[in-house]
Image (cartoon, rainbow, N blue to C red):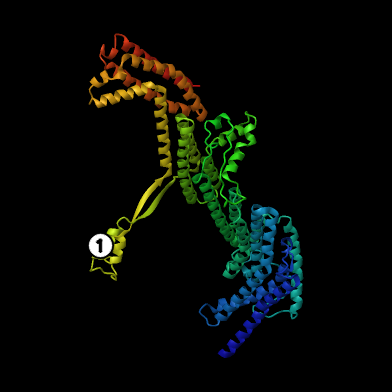
Amino acid sequence: YFRRACALQDAALELLRVAVADRISVISTQIQDALNLPKVPLKADKLEASLVYTRFHGISKRSNKLITIARRRLDALGDGSVAAVGYEDLLTLCRNTYCGAREVLLTSTVRNHMDILKERHGLVGMTRLASVFLIRLCTVETALYLDFFGDPDKRRHPRKAVKGSVQTNDEGKSEEGDEDKEERNQEAAATRRQQHNNTNNNNNNNKVPAAATLASQILSEDSTFRDAEFQSMLGGLCSSLHRTIRRGLVSILDLDVLCQVVSVLREERSVANKSPTTMAAARAVSGVIQDAQERLIFCANTALHKEVVRFKPTPADLNYPGKFLGEKPKAAIVIEDDKRDSKEPSSTEERKEEVNDPSATSDPNDAVAAQLRVYESWFPPMRSVLRILSKIFRVVEPRVFEDIALQSVQSCTKSLKEGSIYILRASGQIHADLFLVKHLLILREQLSPFDIQLRSVERQLDFSEAGKAVSRFLANRNRRLFSMSTENALITLLREGVSVQESSVDSKRDLEDCLRSACNDFIEHTSSSLLGPIAIFVDQCKNAVGSGSGSTDVLIKAPFMNAVLVKGVFSKALENLEGALENVSKQMHLYLENTATQSILMKPVVRKMTRSLEEARRFVGEVPDGANNWEEGAKEEVLKLSEAFETKVKSTTSKHGTR
């Protein structure tokens, strides 16, 4: 009885295999022969109305009934039954046959459609349209798969029986004998239904909500579409998106295009994640996003390395204050790298385009043109850093962005310092100081919206103790090389000879320190410039007092303390003060447009000058009358000159501060 039962079960499984798996293979072969697939791909707009879907819809109802019989029999037998193995193998064979047939029929059409979209719409347009196409394809394929393998009891909207279709009971017996006639009727009905659906869908072919609506109609509690074989087949179809976009990404150097690609893909991924039927498309889009981000990071690092780290300024780039005054820069000869891609514009060409920008000759009352002129007056490395960071801020991961920003800010700060040294030699101290202060203030202000810490920990291997550790290792004759404990000689050698040195890098703190140092330099240099000979006089007095161990005898007898010379120092400084103040005020207004910033910088200058004048008066007061030509009334004249100097400084700076 058992052998007879096994024979009958094998015969039944063979009948099911022929009726489902073999039938799918035959239909697939017939479709390939009729449509000349995969040599001649179908058009995407005619895909759903073609034999690729209509023939499969025609056999889906009967196949689903037979597969349901096998699944119920498997559930009845249980997982531990020996007889259940045959049903499991049958269902796996049917799924593999179905997925293999669908992949063969659709792969060439999907790939050809991707290539056509890329040729017609470019990479960015193709990315959006291809994502919408794949979302629709996943939804339609899921519907067809559930028609074959889904559980009819769990369908939200079960299909009505087509007239003339095969009606089978739980025993698997047919109520009609003409099987071919039934299938032809089903195929004809499915063709008419699919053509009607395709006509309606073509009007909104690129609208994803249609796919989401269809998915909601398909699914209820049936999770058959999550089968590994089917999801693998969908992943293979969706990989065409990765294949096509990746070939286009490797040749793109434009950061704007890459940012657009990532933004579009993120939008489409969020749409695909809303429906469980389109998770395969979401996974494919996620893979493409990672590749696009890698390409974007590579291009951003390359641009920063070229335009910031390896930046070689020309006289036109450091033409300060000429850039603010509208002076035309002189042409400079720049040797370009022969290995550079001919399609990639050089930084020199970009700077020439910026200099010759028509916005520079626009209406001065135009706010946009004025803002462009301000932007063009920035130092090119800082301009490049802020431009690149603003582009990639929204399209790369925060940790990656912070790492790029940290390195770029360090390189930009270094480049600004080098530029100030050149300006110091070419234009003078005040221009070098204001150049550095201006750009560091702008850099700090422009980085604040990113809300990043700009901190990292750098780790380096320290081999300074390696020599001593090796000597101890060789000198130890009782070393245990094969000991399985912490006393192993090799472990001890590595622990003592190599150490890890950690150092904290804080670019934001370094930027603040650099800005503070630049402001202090400006205060020091400006106060000394405005004081003129008075500053030199005060330094001479300090040196004299210091060399005399605090005694004023050396100071009293010093030649520079002669009453006539001291009076001449204060008179000359007072005469030059007005012009010097006007020049400082003019240059500060040229570099720093904000009057509040100018006032903040000038207040410490005035305080430092006031302290220097007090020290000068104190040194003069220590000289007794009659010594070193200090006649009666000489001190009063010097003190009056000093007070006049101080009053003029305060009144002039307050006037310019309220201007």
Q: Residue 475 lies in what quarter of the image?
A: bottom left
x%, y% of residue 523? 41, 29
Q: Give 506 or 568, whichever is nearer the viewer.
A: 568
Residue 541 appears anywhere in the view: yes
Note whether 370 is above or below 657 in the view shown: below
Note whether 64 is above or below 517 in the view shown: below
Q: Residues within 10 Å of mark 1 (few under 14, many from 20)?
A: some
Residue bearing mark 1: 472
Residue 224 appears anywhere in the view: no
Q: Give 572 or 238, whichever is nearer the viewer.
A: 572
The quadrant of the rendering that contains the N terminus is bottom right
Q: Give 44 or 548, whichever is nearer the viewer.
A: 548
- Report the side of 176 relative to 223 (left or right): right
- Report the side of 472 relative to 101 (left or right): left
Q: Give 618 or 116, whichever is nearer the viewer.
A: 618
Residue sitting at x 53%, y 34%: 319
x%, y% of residue 352? 60, 39
Q: Secondary structure at mark 1?
A: helix
Q: Which amino acid lies under the numbered mark 1 shown in the image of this protein?
A: Arg
Residue sitting at x 37%, y 15%: 568
x%, y% of residue 36? 74, 71
Residue sitting at x 50%, y 46%: 310
Q: Residue 414 lies in what quarter of the image?
A: top left
- Report the side of 485 relative to 532 (left or right): left
